[in-house]
DNA sequence: CTCATTGCAAAGCGTTTGCACCAGT
DNA sequence: ACTGGTGCAAACGCTTTGCAATGAG
């Protein structure tokens, strides 16, 4: 559901490369490869998954570099990190208007995104009621996704 | 804000002891001590904090036992575990109607609870719109709490 | 008396870091 | 050339686990 068109992906990587130049940050083979994987992936990738994809592409990159680059990408605002209580983090491209929430499937681990205008407007109001200055939030619903529900139905029907 | 009256706390511990008997689970000194700490604590305690409190009470309990007992308490539904992205978990007593959300202060680490009826009713509806069967959810707002805001004001006024 | 729990220390797991080597600019 | 990035392996912090000793029912 990270609706990123091919154009937007290319553009995102372009922005990353330009930003690196502006910041006089060396654009290494590894950094570029990692950025391509994470910024074009429409899943919420774990470090393990990123390393796997790099291998598949024939890129050899050390784990430490992956972590260091992810921190760079996160600090620069190109990537957002998430922690779904699985014991490890997942990373996704950060688009500007792209503040969204997550549906996390407890069966297959898939993460589906959603936005809900009413919900989003509500949160700062709630914070305000508690004299709390909000910075960011996290709304996650855990349960069973459409596909796994279908699987359950088939089991029963059999 | 975990508004638990002294009576409710005693009752909760009583329920735990009864449950252990019913389940033919040995009620050891350690388990009882841990339950007393966690079920009467109105904070979101880390394992480290639990161990510290046990020491203060003169109870000597191994860390492994704390983890094992917390899992027992969680599976039995007496305790709820939370992961606020700090790299460790926190535990709080689980009260029946006590489904609530959290305001997490990024300055002092304090966690304040809140409930919001409208928000709570909204979430299953959202899940439904995505053909997703919800089981549990997590709503967290990160920012600056009332007290830390006051601190900032004093800094400026000075 | 029996069987589950405890405590210790070792292992696990994701993540971070020190340091010699290597590569962008 | 200079500066900073990379890779390996060791260190880390939280959590889990193996196993002999202990204690609850």
Image (cartoon, coloured by chain):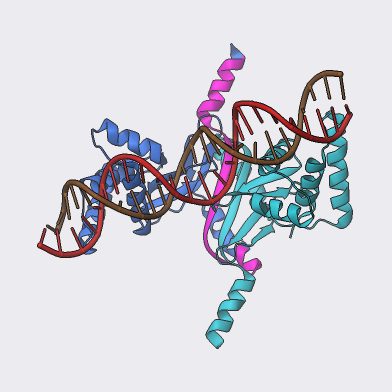
Chain colours: A blue, B cyan, C brown, D red
* Above or below for B77 versus A14: above
x then y, percent, for residue A35: 29, 47
Q: Is residue A30 magenta?
A: no
Give me the residue at 34% from left, 37% from top. A51
> Quarter of the image holding residue A36?
top left
Left or right: A15 in relation to B139:
left
> Quarter of the image holding residue A46?
top left
The C terminus of chain B - image quarter = bottom right
x then y, percent, for residue B103: 62, 59
Q: What stretch of residues is rendered in magenta?
A: A127-156
* Above or below for B85 versus B31: below
Give me the residue at 57% from left, 58% from top. B141
Q: Can you see residue A95? A: no
Left or right: B69 in relation to B14:
left
Give me the residue at 59% from left, 74% from top. B149
Of residues B103 and A6, which is closer to you in this image? B103
x then y, percent, for residue A77: 36, 57
Left or right: B120 in relation to A111:
right
x then y, percent, for residue A118: 55, 55
Of residues D24 and A49, which is closer to you in this image? D24
Q: Is residue A149 magenta?
A: yes
> Quarter of the image holding residue A33?
top left
The N terminus of chain B - image quarter = bottom right
Give me the residue at 76% from left, 42% from top. B78
Of residues B27 and A115, which is closer to you in this image? B27
């Amino acid at each position: 559901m990270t609706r990123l068109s091919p154009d937007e992906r290319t553009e995102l990587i372009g922005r990353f490369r330009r930003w690196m130049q502006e910041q006089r940050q060396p654009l290494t083979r590894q950094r570029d490869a990692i950025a391509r994987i994470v910024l074009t992936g429409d899943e919420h990738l774990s470090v393990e998954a990123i390393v796997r994809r790099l291998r598949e592409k024939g890129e050899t990159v050390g784990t430490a570099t992956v972590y260091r680059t992810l921190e760079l990408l996160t600090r620069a605002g190109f990537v957002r990190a998430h922690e779904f209580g699985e014991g490890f983090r997942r990373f996704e491209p950060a688009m500007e208007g792209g503040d969204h929430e997550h549906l996390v499937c407890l069966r297959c681990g898939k993460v589906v995104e959603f936005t809900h205008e009413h919900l989003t407007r509500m949160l700062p109001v709630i914070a305000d009621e508690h004299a709390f200055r909000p910075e960011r939030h996290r709304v996650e619903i855990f349960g069973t996704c459409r596909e796994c529900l279908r699987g359950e139905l088939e089991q029963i029907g059999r």
